[in-house]
Image (cartoon, rainbow, N blue to C red):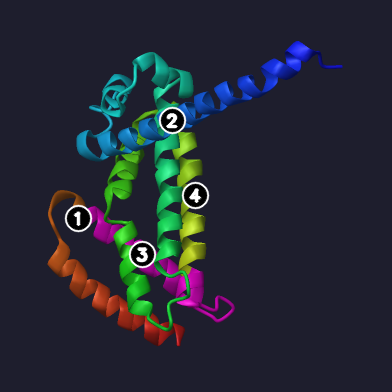
């Protein structure tokens, strides 16, 4: 049974706890966003926990409270932004695409040419040499890949029961990844636009 003191203290404790929880969530989000930005700009070697914490405006201790290891921080960061990009992609077409597959192709290519892809690429390179990181990144990328494929199928209104349709969608996503790689070293905007136009036509003809 609660006492009078407990009842008096309860609401205040709830009020005090909620702002602390909000601050913790905000700190975690700042760290994730800073980690992705650092990976995209400085690569794996230049993206230490201290660098990320400084960019996020928090102490190193606070960063390690949320993410005990460097691997925890960076895999969580790429996962977080991947989920955000998936949500953003869906938000581009809240009422459906109205038959405009070119817009879908363009949006999906953009998914592979932004900061998320550059950050993920740095993780792939690091994972090829870091045994502890490799399994986690491989698992994450497999999950993100499945989600991206599922979103592509839905937005393109692709009927994967038809022969070759699944391969067409996957081939398109592989092409988009390749455009993202080409964009890492140089601004490939002009060529990318021409390729997107051609692939939009191919997808339209293949999916019917």
Residue plotted at (34% across, 43% down): 120
Asked if residue 167 is positioned above or below residue 187 in the image, the reply reads below
Question: What secondary structure is the stretch in magenta mostly built from?
Answer: helix
Q: Secondary structure at mark 1?
A: helix
**Residue 104 as seen in the image, left or right of residue 182:** right
* Real-space CA distance between mark 1 and mark 3, rounded to the nearest whole angstrom: 15 Å
What residue sits right under mark 1 in the picture?
Answer: 183
> Does 30 sit above or below residue 193?
above
In three-dimensional space, the C-alpha distance between marks 1 and 4, rounded to whole angstroms, equals: 22 Å
Asked if residue 175 can be seen in this view, the reply is no
Sequence order check: which comes first, mark 2 or mark 4? 2
| Residue range corresponding to the magenta coloring | 153-182
Answer left or right for 93 relative to 46. Answer: right
Measuring from the top left, give residue 204's x and y in whole percent.
38, 84
Going 46% across and 69% down the picture, which residue do you hit? Answer: 94
Disc nearer the start of the sequence (1/4): 4
Left or right of residue 122: residue 22 = right
Answer whether residue 27 is magenta in the image.
Answer: no
- In the rendered image, residue 155 lying in the magenta stretch gets the answer yes
Q: Which residue is identified by label 2? A: 28
């Amino acid at each position: 049974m609660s006492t009078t003191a407990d009842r008096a203290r309860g609401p205040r404790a709830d009020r005090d706890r909620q702002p602390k929880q909000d601050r913790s969530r905000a700190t975690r989000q700042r760290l994730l966003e800073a980690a992705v930005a650092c990976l995209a700009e400085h690569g794996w070697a230049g993206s230490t926990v201290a660098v990320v914490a400084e960019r996020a405006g928090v102490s190193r201790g606070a960063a390690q409270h949320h993410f005990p290891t460097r691997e925890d921080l960076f895999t969580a960061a790429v996962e977080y932004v991947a989920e955000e990009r998936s949500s953003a992609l869906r938000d581009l077409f809240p009422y459906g695409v109205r038959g405009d597959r070119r817009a879908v192709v363009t949006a999906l290519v953009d998914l592979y040419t932004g900061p998320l892809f550059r950050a993920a690429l740095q993780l792939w390179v690091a994972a090829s040499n870091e045994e502890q990181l490799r399994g986690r990144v491989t698992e994450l990328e497999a999950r993100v890949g499945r989600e991206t494929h599922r979103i592509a199928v839905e937005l393109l209104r692709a009927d994967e029961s038809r022969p070759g349709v699944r391969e067409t969608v996957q081939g398109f996503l592989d092409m988009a990844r390749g455009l993202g790689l080409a964009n890492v070293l140089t601004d490939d905007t002009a060529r990318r636009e021409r390729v997107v136009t051609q692939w939009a036509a191919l997808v339209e003809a293949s999916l019917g």
